[in-house]
Image: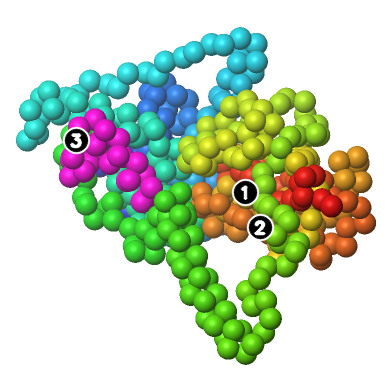
Amino acid sequence: MDDVDNASDYRELVRRTQRGDQESLDRLIRLARGKLRTYIYRLTLDHDLTHDLLQETLLHLVESLKQLERVDAFWPWLYRTALGKVQHHFRRREREAEATRHLQANGESAAPPAPSDGADGLSTMIREELLEATVEAIERLNLRQRAVLVLRCFEQKSYAEIAAIMDCSEMAAQVLMFRAKRSLRRHLSRRGFKGGLLCIGLGLFARRTASAGASSVAVSVSRASLAVGAPARSIAILSTHLGAAIGVVLIVVVMAVAGWRVTRRDDASGSPGAGAPDAASRATVFEYPSHLPAAHDPDGDGWRGIEADQVVSRPVDPNVWLCGGPFSEQSSVILPAGHWVELAFGGEIVDAPGDDVFVVEWGANGERARVLVTDGQGRTCALGEIRAARAGLQVPTESGFDLAEANVPFVPRAIRIVSTGGGGGTDGFDLHGVRARVRRASDRQ
């Protein structure tokens, strides 16, 4: 066989190619083409697009292989390059779609799933329906989830290898896998298929999307390939709305018990007014913004937003998405570097014990932003900076700011969020929501 696949052989091919051996380059390209074609198709579900992106990836291999320092990093480097080509295509397509939508509404329909072939233990009709439901479920995954699913279930990569390919931690890869699996099971359940059929459905998908000549693809995917560790499951669950609610309940219970103990201790010592909140706390309430008095869009191309786990951008109105509470459970407005929004409230923002302003960014991908308080008339005062962790996770990052630490020289009425850097798949600071401690006009003496 001409194709080479194992450790020392492909490494030697890489070394010879880097030294300029044309025959080794030809063999390496044949080897890479065979592996990448199926991988890219399972990400795009589009044969023509797969051909184009495969050619781009192989061209990058030819142009950049000499810059690869470690030959044993060849496959992670190549898979990461292919994933980058796919991501770039979808981002470019979304930008083009946005431009088209600005001119006129123009709907497009997704390509139908390919017909099934082969036989297994299920009846033909059920098998066809299961395959169709599985394709639909995979199409609904965001690109990062789909990439982890493909690498883990169909390319048999370890989580360590996936982390290297996707430039994230192993924990982040497992969290993405857990969410992908949960999303697939939910969709199959809505189509009337029990969760136990997920492995069979993925096996049918694997057979359907396999390269020509790969007739030995397994009918079912191993349950072990879908497994993730308990820490990853906990992180994935706690980052959902239900998980956050459970966490809040636990915190409230702990605080209530602690508060009861403090009150009992104060009462026993004879302290007057034990447990009574101060006047500033009684007269204020945390509110979402009421309106958007100003925004800065230096590119003049409008604002984009994301909903839920799927990184699907579309034109949005920040006044609708950020005022009166978040637009949806996981929505956010994307602020590219240098862009900002100013959000005003129904009264003046006041200081009281603890943090007075909370900003929530959706994601933990190294996003950054400056937070300022303004008087609504152009005067500003910096409150601090937000720096999201580089965990590669789609979880909320909430940051709190205390007015007392800023020595604000005016009556604050608005919050300005200025993006200084993005991360993840959106290339911007993904602003989910802002809350501030506000004294309404009717509460003033």
Please give the label number shown on residue 361.
1
- Earlier residue among tags 3 and 1: 3
> Residue 384, located in which quarter of the rendered image?
bottom right
Q: Which residue is mark 3?
A: 193
Is disc 1 placed on a helix, strand or loop?
Answer: strand
Q: Residue at x 32, y 29 (%)?
A: 136
| Residue placed most toward the observer, 36 or 187 | 187
Q: Which residue is mark 2?
A: 399
Is disc 2 placed on a helix, strand or loop?
Answer: strand
Mark 1 residue type: Glu
Q: Residue at x 38, y 23 (%)?
A: 47
Residue range in magenta is 177-203
Is residue 244 part of the magenta span, yes or no?
A: no
- Earlier residue among tags 2 and 1: 1
Quarter the N terminus occupies? top left
- Earlier residue among tags 2 and 3: 3
Mark 3 residue type: Phe
Please state if 86 lies on the left or on the right of 266 as rendered: left
Q: Residue at x 73, y 25 (%)?
A: 301
Q: Residue 153's x, y, as percent?
A: 29, 46
- Callout 2 crowding tier (Cα within 10 Å): few <14, some 14–19, many ≥20: some
Q: CA distance from mark 2 to mark 1?
A: 8 Å
Please state if 155 lies on the left or on the right of 12 as rendered: left
| Residue placed most toward the observer, 420 or 217 | 420
Q: Residue at x 91, y 53 (%)?
A: 410
